[in-house]
Amino acid sequence: MAKVSKIVNKEKSLFCAFAFDKRTKKEKSYKDKNCYRKVLKYVLGFSDENKRVRYRGGHGVDFTDIDNAVLQFKTVSKMSSKNNGATRKIYHFFLRFNDKEFDPNLAQIAGDKISEYIFEMGHQNIYAVHEDTEYCHIHFIYNARNFFTGKQYHASKKERDIFLNNVKQIALDIM
């Protein structure tokens, strides 16, 4: 019985969600052509509002240089002839560890594993471990365009929930 309660407690120690607009409480759509640079600057810790980034990583994108990352994201985004300005460019989600004593080194390992999972699905991605709030958390950005198929990723709420549950499970396996 103790093992079951330990698993439940572990699950409660994580919170995972797509980024949302605090004012409207709706998921951010990231359709603006300038969204890449703005979000990358924040997530990677190159903006004035966020300086406490311990680790950065990713797959399929140069996470050390914003200009290269923007170019690489845009190159894949232009793979489809149907690409128009109104489509979503990126997805942004975060994983928060609800333990104030959580080891950021474990967050980096989780970030690498989750980044690999997203890349295997066919999406370039970048992540960064943040310590700018009370709880250690990881921000992830991934390209909405699949680099294998060239297709735009459209997910229902149910599909997004399944994705987030898979992400949480990867993190739980590391904890």
Image: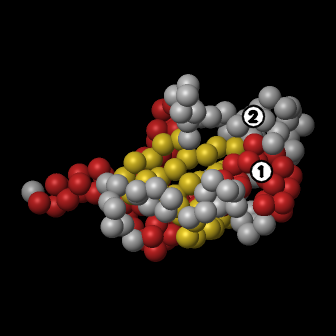
Q: Looking at the image, is mark 1 or mark 2 earlier in the sequence?
A: 2
Quadrant into which the N terminus falls = bottom left
Determine whether the residue tagged by mark 1 lies in a helix, strand or loop.
Answer: helix
Residue 16 x %, y %: 45, 47
Instruction: Report which residue position mark 1 lands on.
Output: 37
Q: In the displayed orientation, state which residue is furthest to the front.
A: 48
Mark 1 vs mark 2, CA separation in Å = 13 Å
Residue type highlighted by circle 1: Arg
Residue at 64% across, 43% down = 91
Quadrant into which the C terminus falls = bottom left
The tally of labels here is: 2
Determine whether the residue tagged by mark 2 lies in a helix, strand or loop.
Answer: loop
Residue at 58% across, 65% down = 53
Residue at 84% across, 60% down = 67
Instruction: Report which residue position mark 2 lands on.
Output: 31
Q: Is residue 86 left or right of residue 104?
A: right
* Residue 2 vs residue 135, the one in the foreground: 135
